[in-house]
Image: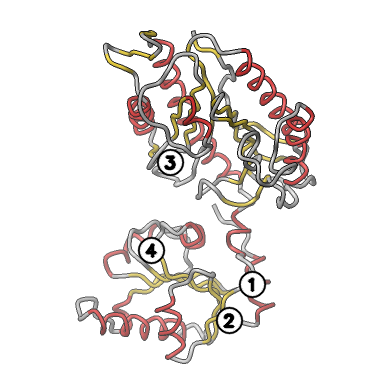
Amino acid sequence: MYPDLSPLSDALADADVDGYLLDADSGESDQLYLSGFDAPDEFVTLYTPDGTFLLVSGLEYGRATEESRADEVARLSDYGFQEKVGEHGQTEGRNRTCAAFLADRAVESVAAPERFPLGTADGLREQGVSVEVLDEDVVTQIRATKTDEEVESVHEAQQANEAAMRAAEEMLEAASVEGGELHYDGDVLTSERVKEEIEVTLLRHGCALDETIVACGADAAGPHNRGSGPLEAGETIVIDIFPRNKASKYHGDMTRTFVKGDPSDEVRRRYDDTYEAFEAALDALEPGVTGEEVHDAVCDVYEEKGYDTLRSDPSAETGFIHSTGHGIGLDVHELPQVSPSGGELKPGHVVTIEPGLYDPDVGGIRIEDLVVVTEDGYRNLTDYPIRLQVE
């Protein structure tokens, strides 16, 4: 995967600086994207129109040389930096080393992201290097348009997601109803037990996650309530899974809403209305439209049926109280936005479509698929049935 970084070169020219600098571990997605190197400790990435250059510890030099997409990899020790020194001396020494690394590449001024480490910025300035923040987060914007390889990485994560959702739904199917609660394998079926099954399934498919959502009843009325405790019959159960592939680092994302037993007429009505809003968003999705226009299509459906939305009432606490979707990739939430502030959608944008309705008296309902915008419309990367009632 070799992304087109020409917009970053253009931004550097506009800012009249020599290069773009990152100082972070690969948990910072822009660092992983720009360097192509996955490392748990901080390292330096320099991008200039002439190439990409890494400055790493001796421990990581071999891997960085083999695995990164850098044109050149340098070691801290190449500049006489000793890693086993006192804390204060280590910080100052590393900054001097970084300044020498830049000087070797005729870089006297750099742009950096807004959250660049203050200590590194001040240390470089003390060494005579100009450091300034770019007005726009250019690398994050570049990341919004996925290569074919990136789309496939997202698709692989979504396939693992589907296996995990299937495992969760099968638990609900196998559960019995006793005293209004679900029971599975002789015990009360809890949110925690379903999450465990989801996590184990994802691990078997090469994915992992820090947390997921299995929220029942009133808990499901909070869009980001993770859920806890017993699952109940006749109540909505929102399952939202957003795993990360451990090899590629790309995410999937999907939500389904289930009811074990008989849903109320109100729940069924809200579910049908949400499915209609979901379909309206997909019907509106094509290259050239804005995320705002897709979001408006969802709001139009909900408002016509009498629900509050944040468009009709910015202070609404029930109804449709979030955006229609978001970009996904190395981060589970990234550009572009499918929201009131969403800009033009372009081929290669991978976004979620996830309308929902929320009311503590009824529960929560959300349907979410993951799609990629194409030259002539979109392709759904999700292959999982949409149904409410689990028998």
Which residue, given by chain and number where applicable, does mark 1 sit on? 135
> What element does badge 4 sit on?
helix
Most foreground residue, 13 or 315: 315
Residue at the (35%, 23%) spot, across then down: 190
Q: Tell me: residue 257, above or below residue 373.
A: above
Amino acid carrying label 1: it is Asp
Residue at the (58%, 19%) spot, across then down: 385
Image quadrant of residue 187?
top left
> What element does badge 1 sit on?
loop
Q: Tell me: residue 113, above or below residue 33.
A: below
Most foreground residue, 10 or 198: 198
x and y percentages locating residue 298 in the rendered image: 73, 34
Image quadrant of residue 134?
bottom right
x and y percentages locating residue 127 in the rendered image: 43, 91
Residue at the (60%, 28%) spot, across then down: 367
Which residue, given by chain and number where applicable, does mark 3 sit on? 245
Q: Are marks 3 and 4 in contact (CB under 8 Å)?
A: no
Q: Nearer the viewer, mark 3 or mark 1?
A: 1
Amino acid carrying label 4: it is Thr
Which residue, given by chain and number where applicable, does mark 4 sit on? 65
* Distance in Å between CA atoms under marks 3 and 2: 35 Å
Q: Nearer the viewer, mark 2 or mark 4?
A: 2
* Distance in Å between CA atoms under marks 3 and 1: 32 Å
Amino acid carrying label 2: it is Asp
N-term mark: 1 or 4: 4
N-term mark: 2 or 1: 2
